[in-house]
Structures are given as C-alpha cells and as structure tokens.
Image (cartoon, rainbow, N blue to C red):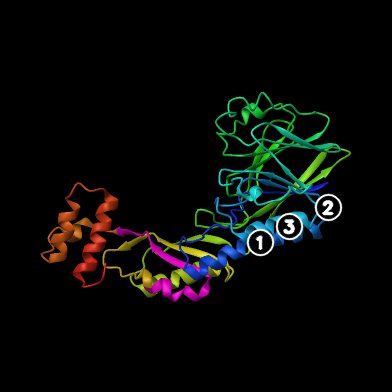
C-alpha cells in the first residue's frame, strides 16, 4: 500500500507578511491549488491513503472555497482513504458544515484511535492537557503489523524516549514546517513531512510531502520526500566585503545569484554581510528595485559591519571624526556603535536614514 504523509497545509492562511495585498490573495489561492495538485498526484500514482498530520486549515474561519475544495477532494475520491488528525490551528468548524462524515474520512480525538488496513494499522491521538502525561502508556500496538502512528507536536512535547519499543514503524508527525526524520528505536523512525508551501522566510527551502510505500507481506517500507511547492522561499547571504558603492554590492549579488539559478517564481530575501568601510555607500532600496524583476518577491537587507580603523580618527579634526570618536568612547555594544556610526555618517552626508 502507498500513503502520502502531509501536514501543516495551513489552507486559508492570510499570507500578508511581506507581500502586497494582490500577492497575498494570489498566494492564498496558490496554496489551495497545491493541495488540489497533491490530490491529483495521489490519483495518478495510485496512492491508497493520505495522512494529514494536523493544521490542515490556518484559522477557525474557513472560507467556503477552502471548505468545499477539501470536502470535494475527499468525496470525489472514494478509492483514497483520508486520515485527518487536527493540529493546534484546526478546529471543528470544518466538520460542523458537513451533513455527514464521508466514509473514507477517518478522524482522531483525545484517545488513541486505530484503523486497520489488513496488515497495516494507523493509530493517532490529538494531544491536549488532559492526555499528554498518560498517552504513552495507553498506546498498545500489534507487533505483527506495520504500525503507523500519527501525532501533531514538537519533539519535546512528544516524548520520543517514551515511544521506544512500542512497535512503531513510522511516526507521522506534524507541526514542524521542514522535512526531517530520525530513529525512534531499532524498529521505527519518526518523520516530519514539513509544510506544502512556505509562507515566510522562516520556512525556506524545498517543501512538499512524503510518500510511504509499504510491502504488506514483508511489513517493510520505503519512504521519500517529494518536493511539491509551487513557489519556494530562499534567504541568500551575499558577502560584500570590500564594496564601496551600491554598484559594487550589485555586482556581488549578481555573482552570488549566478551560482544557483533560482526560479523566477521564488520569494527571495537577500542579506548583505561582511565588513565594509565607514565611507561605503550601499542603498538597499535601490538594490531591491534593481533585482525586483528577477523574482516574484525580493527584498535586500543590510547586515554588514563597519570596518573602522580607530587610529584613523584619533586626531581627525572634522565633524565626522569628532562624532566617530564620541561613539567609540561610549559604553554601547560594538553592534550598536556600528549602527549609530552608520546612521550618523548618512546624516552628515545629507542622505535619508
């Protein structure tokens, strides 16, 4: 049998961080389309079941479009079993709008619930304050089956040590928005599928779902991560050490982008790092505008440090020299000194801060 393990879809997320109003609306629809594309993938690749390990939706107020798309995806595909465990962003609002729960939609609650598929079993529990201390002792699995366990939470909240020697083969987790996996014991592994689409620059890199392919006779399985996002987010660090002008910085950005040809559909945050001279002129607004057409969304941030030779200003009688000496003699942190000197020199040069 073949299963998709996905989580943290956050359908109906507002997507207002960083993006314009029009882009936010577009990204909101793109996330819905990615969910729909995942269902098409399941049909085309003969997937038997889809495990949704929490946070299918983003808010309690689910739009009719998102609600109907999920409902129709389940009801129009009776050959696929859907296993939906609510996460911390989910509520019962979705179910309250359903006249009947479709036969191929399997739900979980605050007690262990197990669904059997021949030699494969799927068990899940929704963690809350009433069960988090007792749920491990109450988990009982058949060691002669391939056991999938579904939970939503971060490791720490989920005690992996307490899951050892329980007969778990695959622990399908949600809540962490990047793909990762590791061993539980000699028998089983845990896996976070990550989210389907990154929504902010804390969710960079490839996003998608996991396909679990189980041999029902041997009770063994292989699994693979499937990158599936329509758009990816990247934070790109560019060392501009030695740059003296905006044009110098632009050339270094061009060189860095040439190393990894990112898709024009990407959302990109370019962070300038390194050490630059006190008199260096770098205009991040100009750079943002310059590279704007390269990507769907792009922004340039300056996190460079000033390279200051203290001896150069010991006897400098200029206003700039007096200002820099005053700042260097203060009890501010080195990071704060650099920031103040940068702003001060911009002001002395008549530039907008």
Give x and y (percent) for residue 167.
75, 29
Task: Give the residue drawn at x 70%, y 27%.
Answer: 139
Mark 2 or mark 1: which comes first in sequence? 1
Please state which of residues 330 and 183 is positioned toward the viewer in this rendering: 183
Q: Measure the C-alpha gap from mark 3 to mark 1.
A: 12 Å
Task: Give the residue drawn at x 62%, y 60%.
Answer: 64
The magenta segment is 286-306
Q: Please tell me how crowded label 3 is: few (under 14), some (14-19), or many (20+) other residues with Cα within 10 Å.
A: some
**Residue 290 among magenta residues:** yes
Would you say 240 lies left or right of 58 here? left
Would you say 104 lies left or right of 129 here? right
Q: Is residue 301 above or below residue 175?
A: below
Which element is circle 3 on? helix
Please state which of residues 303 and 10 is positioned toward the viewer in this rendering: 10
Which element is circle 2 on? loop
Q: Which residue is mark 3?
A: 73
Q: Which residue is mark 2?
A: 79
Q: Please tell me how crowded label 2 is: few (under 14), some (14-19), or many (20+) other residues with Cα within 10 Å.
A: some
Task: Give the residue drawn at x 53%, y 71%.
Answer: 295
Viewer can see residue 128: yes
Mark 3 or mark 2: which comes first in sequence? 3
Q: Which mark is residue 34?
A: 1
């Amino acid at each position: 049998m073949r299963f998709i393990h996905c989580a943290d879809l956050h359908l109906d997320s507002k997507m207002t961080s960083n993006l314009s109003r029009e882009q936010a609306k577009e990204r909101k629809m793109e996330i819905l389309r990615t969910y729909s594309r995942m269902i098409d993938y399941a049909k085309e690749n003969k997937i038997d079941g889809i495990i949704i390990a929490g946070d299918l939706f983003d808010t309690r107020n689910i739009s009719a479009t998102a609600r109907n798309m999920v409902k129709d995806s389940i009801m129009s595909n009776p050959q696929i079993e859907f296993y939906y465990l609510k996460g911390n962003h989910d509520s019962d609002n979705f179910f309250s709008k359903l006249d009947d729960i479709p036969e191929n939609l399997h739900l979980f609650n605050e007690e262990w619930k197990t669904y059997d598929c021949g030699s494969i079993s799927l068990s899940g529990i929704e963690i809350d304050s009433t069960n988090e201390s007792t749920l491990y002792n109450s988990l009982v699995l058949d060691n002669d089956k391939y056991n999938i366990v579904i939970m939503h939470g971060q490791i720490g909240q989920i005690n992996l040590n307490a899951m050892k020697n329980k007969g778990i083969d695959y622990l399908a987790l949600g809540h962490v928005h990047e793909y990762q996996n590791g061993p539980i014991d000699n028998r089983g592994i845990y896996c976070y599928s990550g989210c389907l689409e990154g929504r902010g620059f804390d969710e960079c890199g490839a996003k998608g779902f996991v396909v679990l392919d189980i041999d029902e006779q041997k009770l063994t399985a292989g699994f693979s991560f499937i990158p599936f996002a329509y758009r990816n987010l990247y934070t790109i660090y560019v060392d501009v050490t030695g740059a003296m002008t905006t044009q110098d910085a632009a050339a270094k950005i061009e060189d860095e982008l040439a190393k990894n040809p990112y898709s024009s559909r990407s959302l990109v945050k370019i962070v300038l790092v390194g050490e630059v001279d006190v008199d260096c002129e770098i205009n991040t607004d100009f750079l943002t505008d310059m590279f704007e057409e390269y990507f769907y969304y792009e922004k340039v941030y300056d996190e460079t440090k000033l390279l200051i030779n203290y001896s150069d200003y010991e006897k400098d009688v200029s206003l700039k020299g007096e200002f820099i000496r005053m700042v260097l003699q203060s009890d501010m942190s080195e990071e704060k000194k650099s920031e103040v000197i940068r702003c001060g020199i911009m002001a002395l040069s008549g530039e907008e801060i």
